[in-house]
Structures are given as structure tokens and as C-alpha cells.
Image (cartoon, helix red, strand yellow):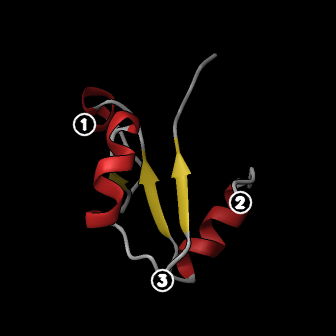
Amino acid sequence: MPKEIDRDDVRRLVAGGAQLVEVLPSPEYEEDHLPGAIHIPLRQIDSRAGEMLDRGRPVIVYCWDTA
């Protein structure tokens, strides 16, 4: 079940083995992204998540938005 977490939670979860996924469009991801983040554009998440993510580890999904 998705839930919002803060920066400290992200650090703790990643240190514990969680996968950090950025769903930004490719140009934005290439311009700047979080260290160690896996890139799966949001429009491709359904088709690519199974091949790119480990189902046995937690997943943190991140998308920077100025809105």
C-alpha cells in the first residue's frame, strides 16, 4: 500500500535494502536524479517494473514535482 515518507525514512529504507525508483521523464532524470536511483519513467512502470525490480525488496517511488 503506498504511503508518503520523509527524507529520513528514505535514507533508512535504502540503507536497509529498499529499491529507489525515479519515475521522471528521461530528460529530467538525465539532468538530475537521486544517487543510486533506478530509472523507470512513469508511463513505463507497469511494463518494466517486473524486469527491473526485485519483488522481494521494498520499493520507494520518487517523482519530483513543482506543482
Residue 33's spot in the image, x, y percent?
Answer: 38, 44
**20 in relation to 64, above or below:** below
Look at label 3 and name its amino acid.
Answer: Gly
Q: Nearer the viewer, residue 47 or 4?
A: 47
- Mark 2 and mark 1 residues within 8 Å of each other at the beta carbon: no
State the SS at label 3.
Answer: loop
- The residue wearing badge 1 is 30
- The residue wearing badge 2 is 1
**28 in relation to 58, above or below:** above
Residue at 42%, 47% in the rendered image: 22
State the SS at label 1.
Answer: helix
Q: Residue furthest front?
A: 47
Look at label 2 and name its amino acid.
Answer: Met
How crowded is the residue under tag 1: few (<14 C-alpha within 10 Å), some, or many (20+)? few
User: Mark on residue 56?
Assistant: 3
Residue 26's spot in the image, x, y percent?
Answer: 26, 33
Quadrant for the N terminus, please. Answer: bottom right
Residue at 75%, 53% in the rendered image: 3
Point out the tag, 2 or 1, that comes first from the N-terminus. 2
How crowded is the residue under tag 3: few (<14 C-alpha within 10 Å), some, or many (20+)? few
